[in-house]
Every structure is written in C-alpha cells, then in structure tokens.
Amino acid sequence: KHTRLNPSHLISLAGRRLYADPHQALAHDIIRRLNEEEDSPLRGDIKILGVGRGRVSQASLADEMGDLFSNIEKIGGTNRFKEFEQNGKRFFLNYFKAIQSLFPKAWAGRKYSIKTGAALRAFIRVSPDVMARSKELKNDPFDHFGIREAIKPWGERIGEGRFETDGEWRKKLAGGTRGTVELLARELRDGMKAP
C-alpha cells in the first residue's frame, strides 16, 4: 500500500544505514546530536521523525546541511569534506552555543523567531563564512572562541530585535521561507564584514 511519508521520517530512516549518500548521513548525525546532546542549545527543539516538542522540522535542516556539504566538497574537494565530516558535529554545537550567547534574550524568548526553521537554515547557510573567519582569527575553523569572535559583530549590526516575531522579523518576511532564509543569510554575511 502506498502512503505519503513525512519528509522528516525519510531523513531519520535514512541515517547512516539506508543512504549511501555521505552528506545525508552526516546531516542526520549532526541534527540528532544537536537535538539530543545535554549541552546543545537546540536540545529537544527539532522534530525528529515528525514528532517531539520541537518547532523545527528535521527535513528542512537536513536539506540545508546537504546543500552545504555538497558545496564544501565541490569547492574544497574530498579532503575538505572529510575534515568537515570529522569536525562538523563539534562545529555546529559550538556555533549554536555562540549564537545563543550572542542573542540570549531572543534565544530564550517566546516572542522571537530565532529558533524557527527559516532562521536556523540561514545560520547554516552562512556557516562557511563563519568557519573562514574563525580560521583567520584562531587558525581553527571549528574553534568555539574563533566562532564566537567571528559572529560577534552580529550583536551590534543585526541585534536581537531582528528576530522579534511581531517586529522586524515580520516586516522582513520575503515571499515565503526560501526568500526569508536568503534575506537573513545575506544580512548575516554582511554583518560579519568589516565596516
């Protein structure tokens, strides 16, 4: 009998066992770690298999990460992807901890959209820029302190108000999720550049 499956189910079922695609497998591992790790800022916030108290779909994050890993491999080659395979979980855990500490009020507040699928996808999309800046600052693209320093300008240039659901977030919705993700990613990229 054919039934439609929730995309999150496919991602979870895929994992390392069913998909030969290393990008999907790595995305699955990272998302599970972000959702399950005791010290993860996203603990319990991601709907795994379409269930859980989380507000964010696992499938949308996995798609964004899959694109990211594909680009890392295209631009940096197989060795660069292997390096990311080794350090990706550490990077994303450090990255979201740094975002949480930079925007504590927005991260904890219910009236903010910082932990929505669109915002998280934008953060994932600009992660290569964050890694490059961290490498410049601390000679390690995955270093917690390097990541924190790399995104520090966002505190001043972007600010927590950008994520206020009934404020700037709503004003800057750009024709659906894809447009909103792209607009925020562009703002985040610009916010890291030297003035």
Image: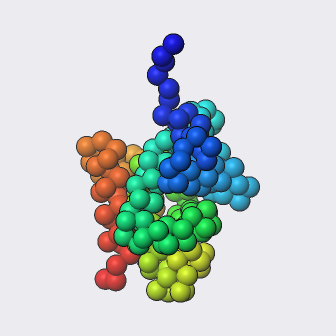
Q: Position of residue 57 (x, y in %)?
A: 51, 40
* Front-lying residue, 93 or 77: 77
* Front-lying residue, 44 or 88: 88
* Front-lying residue, 97 or 163: 97
Residue at 61%, 62% in the rendered image? 89
User: Could you tell whether 73 is left or right of 43 in the image?
Assistant: left
Residue at 30%, 57% in the rendered image? 183
Q: Residue furthest top?
A: 1
From this view, report whether residue 172 is shown above or below residue 97.
Answer: above
Q: Residue furthest right?
A: 38
Counting the numbered discs, the total is 0
Q: Position of residue 63 (x, y in %)?
A: 44, 47
User: Could you tell whether 189 is left or right of 66 in the image?
Assistant: left
Quarter that holds the C terminus = bottom left
User: Could you tell whether 44 is left or right of 10 in the image?
Assistant: right
Displayed quadrant of residue 158: bottom left
Residue at 50%, 50% in the rendered image? 21
Residue 151 visible somewhere in the drawing: no
Residue 86 visible somewhere in the drawing: yes
Q: How is the image coloured?
A: rainbow
* Front-lying residue, 117 or 165: 117
Q: Position of residue 47 (x, y in %)?
A: 58, 39
Residue at 30%, 42% in the rendered image? 176
From this view, report whether residue 2 is shown above or below residue 15.
Answer: above
